Amino acid sequence: MRDHCVRYDYYFFEKMKRLTTAISALAVLLLVQCSSPEITTRRVTDFNSNWTFTSDSTGQQGWAKVQLPHTARIEPLVVNDMWQGTCWYEKVFELGSLEDQRAFVRFEGVMHEADIWVNDTFVTKHVGGYLPFVVDVTDYALVGQNNIRLRVNNEDNPVIPPGKAIDVLDFSYYGGIYRDVTLTITHDIHITDAVAADQVNGGGVLVHFTEVSKELAKGIVKVHLRNDGDLDRAVRFTADIGGTTVRTEAAWLHGHSDTTLIQAIEIVKPRLWEPQSPELYTLSIEVEADDQVVDHLEESTGIRQIELTEDGFFLNGEKLFIRGTNRHQEYPYIGYALSDEAQYRDAVKIKNAGFDMVRLSHYPQDEAFLQACDELGIIVMNCLTGWQFVGDEAFIANSYQEIRDMIRRDRNHPSVFFWEVSLNESGMSDEFMTTANAILDAELPYQDIYSAGWIDHPAYDLFIPARQHGKSPDYWNFYQDGQRKVFVAEYGDWEYYAQNAGFNQKAFEDLAEEARTSRQLRGAGEQRLQQQALNYQEAANSNRKGQDVGTIGHANWLMFDYNRGYADDIESSGISDIFRLPKFAFSFYRSQRPAAEYYDFAASEAGPMVEIASYWTAESAPQIKVYSNTEEVMLYLNDELFGQKTVERDVYSTDLDFPPFVFDLEAFEEGTLKAVAKIGGQVVAKDSVSTPKAPVTIKLSVDLSGVPLAEEQSDVVFVYAQIVDQHGTLVPTDERAVTFTLDGAEAELIGENPVKAEAGIATILLRTHSFVQDLTIRARAEGVASDDLVLQK
């Protein structure tokens, strides 16, 4: 009955078109209506479980059951011989009848070549490891059992960005299907995937507000529809954002074709997105064909006004100096195979470190991380994959396509302010830079879209040198070109590591790590960690001198320690180590956030703070540095007031918002240092450190950062075993080996086990496949009491 009715509609409409060209599709909808059985709208399901994997090149033996995200090999802590090669993934899954429906498998990230077969038929090949691709399995699918198989290769390939071989690249990329995969079932008439559609300024859903004020926001919602059925249909969409609903007029969509519908939208008194108040809206799109709903899609977005002018950078009308950092997306052992929750926990740590911005060095990162930045109020500089390499025409073509795909994937994120369409520290040609920017302009032809490049070239809106790209001691403090504003994209590491010796990091990998360097592992000792913090303070203070001549912000190098791929050590200039444990520099950056700023999210550490940068042992220097964002700090030694100070400035803090408080004690005295911070005469924060006694026990903890363990999907968290004395004080010199054990189903421990404690803390990864029952983790070590930690379901 339904097919007969639809065919009648089609012939009727064709007849009406012949009678008059003036009749509209809307009129036809009013004239012709017929009922239909239930229509399937969009269904998106997790596709991460029940895969099998082998790294055998034939793909015929040695298959193991795995769950995604997955890395091709568990690596050692220090990765200098990363696994590279061909591996295979296979999944058997069930499908019902796909009559009037389409089935798509979407891969968020596969490193970095993937050949795909469905039911033993080759379907497609994808090149590029950092952005998604979609496989339409409809025409290959069977009713009942189906099979999808991928051949994945991550060997060096000079035409795939970053192009540079791993043994000379300054970061590692890891093999496997390392991001999430989903299965989506849609009606024949459906909203396309923005990347798969491959349309300039189109595909999927695009929302952009071109005029924004506190009173009114004006913009457009643009939806790309595909009709994979045989019959022509009259289609429209309804969009709702924050209770404001708009609806397009109907348009005729022929069978096996596509169309784009655009609708203007206005939001009265919009809630504006900004780092202190990251207001988000849910954009709900409902698609109708012949007055019946056939697709429904929701995503979050935000409304903000950003302006890069001669006077600086403005967000929602307020001038802003951007406090930022850089981030690599890897974890120890599992490489890039982080859960969505782990991505979010990293964003929480960045926010709690005092940063309002992150540069995604040096490649597009996980969609879950961008969503976390949207929700937490972290500005993003999105980056094209690249580092000190420019390849041939094929490499250039792939780079251009990556720019397009990155923009199409991420254009609706309110956190993305800047687009680094630049091959980092690479000798790009004029043609490349001009074309890269032309692609951005075509994809997003709006006034508030800003490109960024490491070369001071007219094509770019923002010049993003690293600090070492300038000459010491001034660097970019007195840049007066006037054509482009400066954002210092990296600082605090290289100028202290190689004394501005150049870009060839491999040639200097054997330089002695003297006290001047910012590359300090957390176990390097108190004095070296204090020097690292001073380096970052000095560089941050210096960068701020450039505000009057065009510097709009800066991003330190970097947030977390990481593996470089070719080196025999971890790149340790992070203000937290690779296990996400903070160093003293973390406290410095926390202190640069105003005490009045408040953030309403779980595990937020905003507000007044005070932290003592010392372990207070016999080896500690008697000069005590206290980081605080308050007006006054009192320091007590064993409950006796030693000193009381208001803000003082020295050569390292002339331009800082919140200089550290420095107290000169005459000599070390065993006991407890306590810092009490005040604002307006009222106590607002306290901190204390005590001289550690002999170690007596282990204290276990797990790092959730306010994000509970995922219940139905894989998750990964750090488990910390602190070696403490009888008072619970960490013993920072303890390096004994700790053995971890686990009781509980659907979980495993990953990492060295036993593992040697670093600065009193031993760390291991807990990976859950699902969280279906309580988990008990035990840690034991010779000479101290053991500890148990129960994670309750």
Image (cartoon, rainbow, N blue to C red):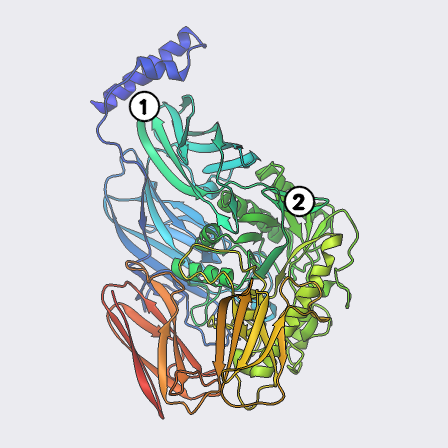
Residue 298 visible in rendering: yes
Task: Tell me what residue is drawn at x 64 percent, y 74 percent.
Answer: 534
User: Label 1 crowding class (10 Å Cα cut-off): few <14, some 14-19, many 20+?
Assistant: some
Q: Nearer the viewer, residue 138 or 643?
A: 643
Q: Nearer the viewer, residue 119 or 384?
A: 384
Residue 46 is left or right of residue 494, and the answer is left
Q: Position of residue 289 (x, y in %)?
A: 34, 26
Please name the amino acid that badge 2 sits on: Leu
Hey, which quadrant is residue 27 in on the image?
Answer: top left
Q: Nearer the viewer, residue 567 or 3?
A: 567
Q: Pointer 1: what residue? A: 291
Hey, which quadrant is residue 710 in on the image?
Answer: bottom left
User: Label 2 crowding class (10 Å Cα cut-off): few <14, some 14-19, many 20+?
Assistant: some
Residue 210 is left or right of residue 67, and the answer is right
Q: Position of residue 73 (x, y in %)?
A: 41, 70
Dots 2 and 1: beta carbons under 8 Å? no
Q: Position of residue 301 (x, y in %)?
A: 46, 42
Of labels 2 and 1, earlier in sequence is 1
In the rendered image, the residue lying farthest to the front is: 681
Circle number at residue 471: none
Q: CA distance from mark 2 to mark 1?
A: 44 Å
Q: Pointer 2: what residue? A: 308
